[in-house]
Every structure is written in C-alpha cells, then in structure tokens.
Amino acid sequence: EVQLVESRGGSVQAGGSLRLSCAASGYAISSRCMGWFRQAPGKAREGVANIHPSGFAAFYGDSVKGRFTVSRDNRNNTLYLQMNSLKPEDTAMYYCAARSVLGACSIDSRDFSYWGQGTHVTVSS
C-alpha cells in the first residue's frame, strides 16, 4: 500500500519559514515525479512545486517562486518543501503527491495518483 505522510505544518508569522517533509512508504520515489500542492478555503487546488526524479529539474508556481524550494532524498524516500518569506496568502492545506508513471513530471494535479493526507500551514500578518 502506498502511503505519503506529510510532516506537521504549523503557524508562523509573515516573513517566517517552515519546512515540510513527506515520507513515502510502499512506493519508491526515486524514478517518479513528486509534487506539492495546496488548497486554501474556497479556492481551487494549486500546484506549488514539483521535482523531477533526478532532482535536477523543478517547477514552481508563480506565487512561490524565489521563496520556496522543493527537494528530494531518494535514498530516504522523502520529499521536502522549504518555505521562506511566508506570506498570509500562503495559508492553506499543503499536500504531497506522487505520480504512478515513471519519469515525466507534470503540473496538473490530475496526473498525480497518490496523495498525502495534507498538513495545514497558517501564516499570520
């Protein structure tokens, strides 16, 4: 059984930082695109970042470019999201996701087969 388990999110003040992790089990992330998505109340799910299996290519949503960094540790089957310079508009439920196919990355949430349970991030002004 594939499981993706995000670390606990938290509450920070604007300008602060948080690091999320996502531990995968029953699934080897090494050959698959992994991603982070988020959904704020009343809004559609948004692609935050994804990362190629090699770790050398990544996509970032326009709203997080320059502030967030996605990384992966294939050896430990873990995905990370370092979030710096957080803003109140970053407040959302954050989800880790993984593709079932090998190789190719995607920014479309519909292309991801496996999802974590989500972790809440609150940024106060």
Image (tube, rainbow, N blue to C red):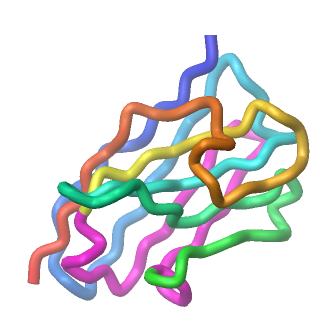
Q: Look at 64% across and 40% down and name the residue there.
A: 112
Q: Residue furthest left?
A: 125
**In this view of the protein, which residue sits in the foreground, 14 or 117?**
117
Whether 103 is among the magenta residues is: no
Q: Look at 73% across and 56% down and name the residue there.
A: 106
Instruction: Give coordinates of residue 75: x percent, y percent.
Output: 79, 41
Question: Is 13 positioned to the left or the right of 118 in the image?
Answer: left
Q: What is the span of residues highlighted in magenta in the rendered image?
A: 64-91
- Residue 91, located in which quarter of the rendered image? bottom left
- Residue 43, located in which quarter of the rendered image? bottom left
Q: Quadrant of the N terminus?
A: top right
Whether 88 is among the magenta residues is: yes
Instruction: Give coordinates of residue 20: x percent, y percent.
Output: 44, 55
Note whether 88 is above or below 15 in the view shown: above
Q: Look at 69% across and 54% down and name the residue there.
A: 72
Q: Quadrant of the C terminus?
A: bottom left
Instruction: Give coordinates of residue 11: x percent, y percent.
Output: 17, 62
